Image: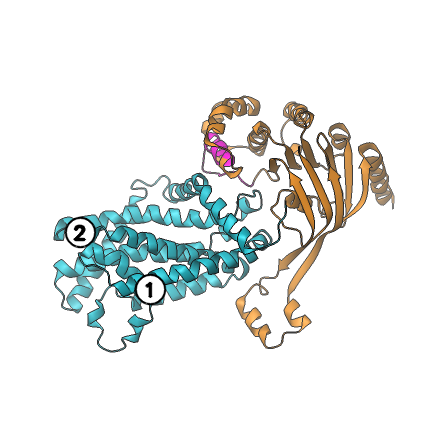
Amino acid sequence: MMRAASVGNGLQDLYHGLGSFRLWTLLGWLDIRQRYARSMLGPFWITLSMGVMVGSMGVVYGTLFGQKMAQYLPMVGDGFVIWGLISGILNESCGAYINNANYIRQNNAGLWVYVFQVAWRQALMFAHNAVISLALMLAFGFPSLTVAWLALPGLLLLVANLVWMGQIFAILSARYRDVPQMVAAVVQIFFYVTPLMWRPDMLHHYRWILTYNPFGALVDISRSPLLGAAPSAQSWLVAAGMAVVGWPLAVFIASKKLHLIAYWV
Amino acid sequence: MPHIEVKKISIELPVFEVKARSLRRELAAIGRRNAIAAQDGKVTVQALSDVSFSLRRGERLGLIGQNGAGKTTLLRALAGIYRPTSGTIIRAGRTVPLLDITLGLDDNSTGRQNIRLRGLFMGLPRQWVAEHEAEISAFSELGDYLDMPVRTYSSGMRMRLAFSIAMSVQADILLLDEVLGVGDSAFQAKAKARLREVAGRAGIVVLALHSSAAIMELCDKALWLQAGSVRMIGKCHDVVREYDNFMHHRLAA
């Protein structure tokens, strides 16, 4: 039955996509398996390359900024691991439809599946990188559990925000092939202006860079608990606000445009 | 009870030039929004226009027509992949499309893993794989190859796997696009028998085929598409005879 586009149907599509979790978890896992097929370390290449980056950047910038390594390395390490998730979902969502054209033109499985596939793939990569966070805790001490558990809801809210952005980027990218490049460029800029390699209090001028950077809040709610500090209430508010505004927007755009994807890819 | 009701559907396919797809073009066109600017480089192809027909249980419809007549587009619309630009399709029953054997299989997964993947794509429950794996294995005659990655398969073997999976689903509506062309004659005979059986258990089968003989053999109804429009629909024999005459005259001319 062909239906007219409406927001109600948009919600139904989303619900149907969530229900197909067996499909998107399998597809996400197949991606990982294929990428690292026949290599000896397999997906632990993700961990290794991230570990080397954290180690080298941490030491260099920690020295440049004159920081104590015991505090600076965990901050950079957890920051990079979380940024890996952020940039991974945002960048690769752009290809969610483009790269799955062969499945899209053969099946009518609902299109949210492919966005969740990307998120799941990145979540698996994040799980591999989390080993680094663990190693840093072993080396520099564990945060107290009373605060650390806050990282879980923080990460969930972070991913929830990334997925709605991912859906919008996926749709735009299917139609306009410049969008993946644009997203990559913008994500790269945010990498530098988000407090990953530096602490917010090190920024003496240009405070507005922090105030108007939503990724600052997203990193705060997911990383600070791992470092033993409670995220600020403001960060939680900003992150929750983004989800409250972003999800209806993504569902609305999806309800208007998803039926065109098969024509665009 | 499975049925398909197609009411005056039209489909316009946008074809993007490499340049037309860029955001720069679109932005540049904002200032001068007129018909030409908006159409700048974007070509739409009228793939189907005003197609109507209906099918009831047990009917087997053959789609015939020259290359580019809209057979695949119509099948994609029936599968719910393309939403028509105008008109409506009412469809009741579990629909299983098998539109292109090279699509929809994961090359790096084994045949067995692909059975699971296809099952999930069709929204089938987890038990389905367990219940039908042996049957698919037997029908496809792939033997030990079922545990080899699909990239090692010949095109005939891929077709056997994809076809066997599609056939093992309790489909009410089966949509097939030129898939019977591949595979050896022994498998083709088996496949044809299976298709009749599916239609026999009160299903609907729609298939696109180039061979008039195969259409006559498999279908009871035929639809002749020409340049996206219905040229003729009716009893299989009548339509195929007209079509063959037409093609014969074109050859002679």
Q: Toward which corner of the image does residue A71 lie, by quadrant?
A: bottom left
Amino acid bearing label 2: Thr
Which dot marks residue A71? none
Image x and y of residue B229, in percent: 77, 49
Residue segment shown in magenta: B103-119
Which dot marks residue A238? 1
Considering every residue shown, the one lying at the far front of the view is A8
Chain of the residue that carries numbered disc 2 in the rendered image: A
Chain of the residue that carries numbered disc 1 in the rendered image: A
Residue with the mark numbered 2? A146
Residues B31 and B69: in front is: B31
Q: Which residue is rendered at x = 74% and y = 34% of the image?
A: B211
Task: Count residues near mark 1 (Cα–Cα under 10 Å), then give few for <14, some for 14-19, many for 20+.
Answer: some
Residues A58 and B151: in front is: A58
Which image quadrant: the N terminus of chain A? Answer: top right
Can residue A224 be seen at all in this image of the molecule? yes
Amino acid bearing label 1: Val
Task: Count residues near mark 2 (Cα–Cα under 10 Å), then give few for <14, some for 14-19, many for 20+.
Answer: few
* B12 to the left or right of B250: left
Image x and y of residue B10, in percent: 71, 52
Comes first in the chain, label 1 or label 2? 2
Q: Which residue is rendered at x = 47% and y = 29% of the image?
A: B112
Looking at the picture, the colour scheme in use is by chain
- The residue tagged with tag 1: helix, strand or loop? helix
Image x and y of residue A96, in percent: 47, 52
Task: Specify the chain shown as orange.
Answer: B
Residue at mark 1 shares a chain with residue at mark 2: yes
B210 falls in the magenta region: no
Instruction: Check the rendered structure and report the hue given to chain A.
Output: cyan
